[in-house]
């Protein structure tokens, strides 16, 4: 309980005081709706531009190895063999690829950071690599404008493609170097839009290698938009999905091989304060990350088979399976998790 209150407060502070990276060079001179939302005439010198950069060079890949210092990370440069060897990447271990959501980047906010930290603390025998596409989702504008620019992420058509293609290219680099023995040793964990991106990475890996990644865990995937493909159960050999804010930040867009409805899947999670609408919604959304993180060292959190829409706990817990990281890959069905 305390854990959550503290996390929620941290999130609140982060959201309200988030002054993301300053390298994007926006100017604030005059306003018009179109220009505000990047639909202007393409000129970039006259107005607020909420169009976010789409340069794939902003996307970074960080290897984490130190459970005692969560900020201790080494960047692995795409197609740079020396940086791969120097990073300490273990060629004999599988790969866990973590993909954050929007309004976030891997260092300043906590979304997938919590998952990363639990893997490290658990001593999970895997290379924990974070995909950081933060600069493509946040601007250096003050918070409220940054939020507007976040909205443009929702309408931007190419975020999923840019990030997923770059990430698949990175995976291909690791495969070519023999750092990853095959797609069968890749587990991708994606939160929110990161889950949608994870699906696209899976499809791209398949089209590059003819093989699917072993597993994708989608944490409260964001809704499908015409230009933002959803996570599909066909994107990996095993796809598990966690829902925590159904009807708010997420919709029931993906039915995984195993789908977990935490406390009915939402829309509101009990640990989230409800005095500020946006914070409450975002908090419920983010709890998917903390529940998944918690499952890494705790295989006793169980899901019980439930009948859709799985809003209420079933009277009898049938065929329980461990929720989260320890879910057996042969699990099939919809599960209610009471937490
Ligand atoms: C946008 O800015 C860049 C760099 O400052 C410049 O080269 C380019 O011509 C500008 N584009 C337009 C349409 O003004
Ligand atoms: C690399 O991974 C393998 C398999 O998980 C493990 O046995 C070995 O100890 C690891 N090597 C290092 C240097 O951590």
Image: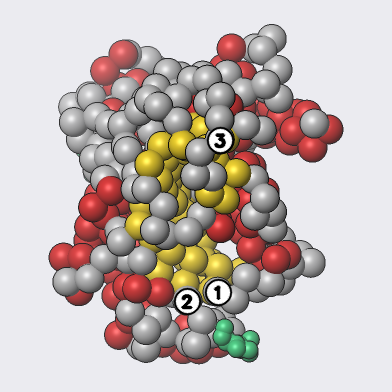
Ligand 2 within 8 Å of disc 2? The answer is yes
* Residue 163: percent from left, percent from top: 33, 53
Label 1 belongs to which residue?
A: 126
Give the colour scheme shown: secondary structure
- Helix or strand or loop: what does disc 1 sit on? loop
Q: For the residues marked 2 and 3, what is the alpha-carbon distance in whole angstroms?
A: 33 Å
Quarter of the rendering occupied by the N terminus: top right
Q: Nearer the viewer, mark 1 or mark 3?
A: 3
Disc on the earlier residue, 2 or 3: 2
Q: In this image, 292 relative to 165: left or right?
A: right
Q: Crowding near pointer 2: few (<14 within 10 Å), some, many (20+)?
A: many
Label 2 belongs to which residue?
A: 94
* Residue 314: percent from left, percent from top: 53, 26
- Front-most of residues 187 and 238: 238
- Helix or strand or loop: what does disc 2 sit on? loop
Quarter of the rendering containing residue 63: bottom right
Q: In this image, 179 relative to 209: left or right?
A: right
Residue that appears at 39% across and 22% down: 309
Residue that appears at 50% across and 38% down: 318
Q: Crowding near pointer 3: few (<14 within 10 Å), some, many (20+)?
A: some
Disc on the earlier residue, 1 or 3: 1
* Residue 108: percent from left, percent from top: 63, 47
Quarter of the rendering occupied by the C terminus: top right
Q: Are marks 2 and 1 in contact (CB under 8 Å)?
A: yes
Ligand 1 position by quadrant: top left
Label 3 belongs to which residue?
A: 317
């Amino acid at each position: 309980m305390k854990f959550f209150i503290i996390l929620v407060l941290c999130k609140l502070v982060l959201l309200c005081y988030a002054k993301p990276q300053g390298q994007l060079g926006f100017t604030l001179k005059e306003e018009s709706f179109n220009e505000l939302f990047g639909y202007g005439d393409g000129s970039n010198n006259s107005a607020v531009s909420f169009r976010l950069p789409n340069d794939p060079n902003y996307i970074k890949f960080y290897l984490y190895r130190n459970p005692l210092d969560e900020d201790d990370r080494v960047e692995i440069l795409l197609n740079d063999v020396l940086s791969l060897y120097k990073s300490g990447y273990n060629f004999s271990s599988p790969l866990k690829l973590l993909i954050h959501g929007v309004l976030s980047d891997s260092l300043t906010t906590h979304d997938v950071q919590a998952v990363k930290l639990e893997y490290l603390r658990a001593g999970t025998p895997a290379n924990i690599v974070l995909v950081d596409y933060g600069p493509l989702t946040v601007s250096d504008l003050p918070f409220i404008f940054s939020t507007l620019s976040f909205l443009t992420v929702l309408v931007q058509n190419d975020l999923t493609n840019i990030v997923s293609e770059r990430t698949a290219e990175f995976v291909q680099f690791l495969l070519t170097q023999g750092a990853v023995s095959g797609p069968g040793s890749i587990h991708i964990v994606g939160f929110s839009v990161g889950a949608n991106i994870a699906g696209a990475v899976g499809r791209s890996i398949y089209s590059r290698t003819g093989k699917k990644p072993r597993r994708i865990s989608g944490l409260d995937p964001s809704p499908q938009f015409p230009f933002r493909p959803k996570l599909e159960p066909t994107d990996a050999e095993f796809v598990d999905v966690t829902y925590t804010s159904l009807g708010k930040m997420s919709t029931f867009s993906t039915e995984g091989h195993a789908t977990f409805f935490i406390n009915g899947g939402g829309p509101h999670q009990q640990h989230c304060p409800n005095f500020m609408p946006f914070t409450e919604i975002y908090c419920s959304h983010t709890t998917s990350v903390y529940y998944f993180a918690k499952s890494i060292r705790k295989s006793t959190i169980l899901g019980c088979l439930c009948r859709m829409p799985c809003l209420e706990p079933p009277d009898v817990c049938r065929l329980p399976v461990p929720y989260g990281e320890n879910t057996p890959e042969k699990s099939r069905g919809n599960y209610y998790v009471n937490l």
